[in-house]
């Protein structure tokens, strides 16, 4: 309850300020206090203040929610007019009952005789002004509070929508990755049981990472790098010596927060479309850091008829990655994809503005098994 006291108590503070202002006006001594003010005058002013308070909250709690917010504008205006008239004539009746006109005459002109019939009934502009001021303040404050409440609801709904969409996108990416990996391991069992066991061990460690370490929505860069290393080494188990794989990471690097499995679709795409069983091929994965900027470069050799695009069904991971970037890093990332470079490569460059740097590290806390063929 003490996390944000200012926002929690803001409506109460605004109401107190409004009533301090209105009370100050209503209870201000007339004529600068230079005359002897009848006691009955203060009775009338307290009655007026009580009616202003009552009309204020009647308007805020009943008239505005029941009429104005439900588009019964004419009824609302008629109710406001009735409230002003009721206050005005009630105060006029209180003045007559307390005999205030005669008392004021004796206080202002004690040398002249009071002639009530000759004086007539005066128009009380101050009561009318106070009534309109109170009801106007009530309407304004209620409308502002309603607008703030609606804004909070919209913000909450938008956040829930983003969270739901991110969960959906992540759920699409994970089965896509594990389906491909399990297919690779299944094929490997036909050739080398020992390496298949090693692959299953790597995959189980990666699954623990995905299921348990990515629940908070963000992971450390060191964990993500280790995860990518495991993935690369897992893919290497089924590749021949014709495939050259380079993983270049900064040494040392700053351990910042990053969305989990954000870079995996680019690697999946490279291994899916950049590997040939008969021709030499190369996959390069490079990470660079400069302060809070992370630059990721993934490129792979192109082969005839195997050039992927973002809109193909096989590129669902890339499509979802772009959407995740839009949601998690709005206006803080740049994704450039060149489908055919002059050197006959498919090139992906991703630049992300990451959160503040936490620490420098060379050894990730998520330790991959660096043993590979």
Image (cartoon, rainbow, N blue to C red):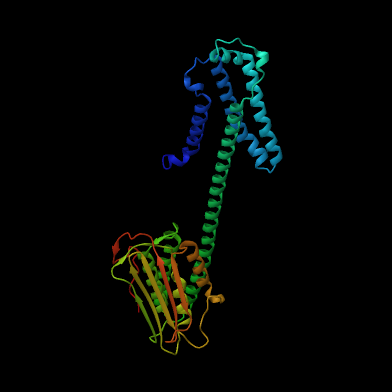
User: Which quadrant holds the N terminus?
Assistant: top left
Q: Is residue 300 left or right of residue 72?
A: left
Residue nearest the observer in this picture, 213 or 31: 31
- Residue 285: image quadrant is bottom left
Query: Residue 337, position in %: x, y?
Result: 47, 77
Residue nearest the observer in this picture, 345 or 73: 73
Task: From this view, report whether residue 315 is shown above or below residue 345.
Answer: above
Q: Residue furthest bottom?
A: 278
Q: Is residue 261 in view from this perspective?
A: no
- Residue 357: image quadrant is bottom left
Total labels: the figure holds 0
Q: Is residue 210 in view from this perspective?
A: yes
Residue nearest the observer in this picture, 118 or 121: 118
Task: From this view, report whether residue 125 is shown above or below residue 224.
Answer: above
Residue nearest the observer in this picture, 58 or 329: 58
Query: Residue 233, position in %: x, y?
Result: 38, 75
Q: Is residue 90 left or right of residue 179?
A: right
**Residue shown at the point (43%, 90%) measured from the top left:** 279
Task: From this view, report whether residue 183 is shown above or below residue 167.
Answer: below
Q: Is residue 241 left or right of residue 19?
A: left
Task: From this view, report whether residue 353 is shown above or below residue 277.
Answer: above
**Residue shown at the point (66%, 20%) measured from the top left:** 121
Q: Residue furthest front?
A: 111
Q: Is residue 185 left or right of residue 50?
A: left
**Residue shown at the point (33%, 68%) measured from the top left:** 290
Query: Residue 344, position in %: x, y?
Result: 44, 86
User: Which quadrant holds the C terminus?
Assistant: bottom left
**Residue shown at the point (50%, 14%) measured from the top left:** 36
Query: Residue 99, position in %: x, y?
Result: 61, 13
């Amino acid at each position: 309850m003490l996390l944000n006291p200012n926002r929690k108590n803001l409506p109460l503070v605004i109401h107190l300020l409004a009533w301090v202002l209105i009370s100050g006006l209503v209870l201000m001594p007339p004529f600068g206090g230079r005359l002897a003010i009848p006691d009955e005058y203060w009775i009338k002013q307290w009655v007026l203040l009580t009616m202003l308070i009552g009309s204020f909250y009647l308007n805020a709690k009943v008239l505005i929610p029941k009429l104005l917010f439900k588009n019964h504008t004419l009824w609302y205006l008629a109710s406001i007019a009735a409230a002003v008239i009721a206050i005005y004539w009630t105060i006029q009746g209180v003045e007559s009952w307390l005999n205030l006109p005669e008392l004021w005459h004796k206080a202002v002109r004690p040398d002249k005789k009071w002639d009530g019939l000759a004086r007539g009934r005066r128009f009380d502009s101050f009561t009318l002004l106070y009534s309109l001021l109170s009801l106007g303040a009530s309407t304004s404050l209620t409308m502002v509070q309603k607008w703030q409440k609606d804004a909070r609801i919209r913000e909450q709904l938008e956040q829930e929508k983003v969270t739901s969409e991110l969960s959906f996108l992540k759920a699409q990416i994970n089965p896509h990755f594990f389906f491909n990996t399990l297919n690779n391991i299944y094929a490997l069992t036909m050739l080398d049981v020992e390496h298949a066991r090693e692959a299953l061990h790597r995959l189980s460690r990666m699954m623990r990472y995905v299921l348990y370490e990515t629940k908070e929505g963000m992971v450390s860069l060191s964990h993500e790098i280790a995860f990518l290393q495991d993935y690369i080494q897992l893919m290497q188990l089924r590749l021949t010596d014709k495939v050259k794989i380079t993983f270049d990471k900064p040494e040392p690097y700053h351990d910042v927060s990053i969305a989990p499995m954000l870079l995996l679709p680019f690697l999946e795409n490279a291994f899916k479309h950049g590997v040939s069983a008969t021709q030499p091929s190369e996959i390069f994965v490079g990470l660079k850091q400069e302060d809070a900027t992370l630059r990721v470069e993934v490129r792979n050799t192109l082969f005839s008829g195997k050039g992927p695009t973002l809109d193909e069904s096989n590129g669902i991971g890339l499509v979802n990655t772009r959407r995740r970037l839009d949601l998690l890093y709005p206006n803080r990332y740049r994704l450039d994809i060149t489908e055919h470079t002059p050197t006959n490569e498919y090139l992906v460059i991703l630049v992300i503005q990451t959160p503040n740097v936490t620490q420098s590290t060379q050894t990730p806390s998520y330790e991959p098994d660096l043993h590979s063929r």
